[in-house]
Amino acid sequence: MTREIIKRVILSEKGAKLAAFNQYFLEVDKTASKPEIRTAVEAKFGVHVLAVRTVNIKGGLRTIRGTRKQKVESTWKRAIVEVKAGERIEMM
C-alpha cells in the first residue's frame, strides 16, 4: 500500500511572502518524516531541497462565524520547504 506524501501546495498570504525567500508551504501526510518529505518534493517538482520544517496543526471544534453552530476540523501537518535559489515550486 503506497501513500501520497504531498497532498497539496498551500496558497496563502504568508506563503506568498515566503515564496520570495524560496520557501513554500505544503500540506503533507500526518505520518510523513522530514526525509520522506524531502525525497517526495524533489521527485514531484524536480527541485533541490535545502531544508524541511514541519508543524502539526491541531484540529478540534471551531465555531462558525455568526452562528451558534460548531464544526469539527481534523488534525493535519504542514511542511515548510526551502528550495535552492533560482528554483521554484509551481503553485497551481
Image: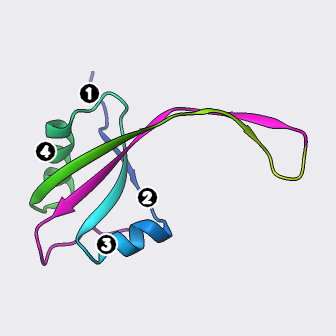
* Quarter occupied by the N terminus: top left
Q: Are marks 1 and 2 in contact (CB under 8 Å)?
A: no
Disc 4 marks a residue whose amino acid type is: Thr
The residue pinned by badge 4 equals: 39
87 left or right of 32 in image: left
Q: What is the C-alpha distance between the residues marked 3 and 4?
A: 20 Å
* Mark positioned earlier in the residue sequence (1 or 3): 1
Whichever of callouts 2 and 3 sits on the residue coming sooner in the sequence is 2
Residue at (49, 71) in percent of width and height = 13
Against 55, residue 25 (above or below) is below
- Mark 4 or mark 1: whose residue is earlier in sequence: 1
Q: Earlier in the sequence, mark 1 or mark 2?
A: 1
Pair 4/1: label in front: 4
Q: Nearer the viewer, residue 40 or 31?
A: 31
Residue range highlighted in magenta = 68-92
Marks 2/4: CA–CA distance: 19 Å
Between the C-alphas of marks 1 and 3, the distance is 30 Å
Looking at this view, is 67 or 6 the one in front?
67
List the residue tagged with mark 2.
Answer: 10
Q: Is the residue under label 3 in contact with that under label 2 (CB below 8 Å)?
A: no
Tell me if 16 is positioned left or right of 48 in this view.
right
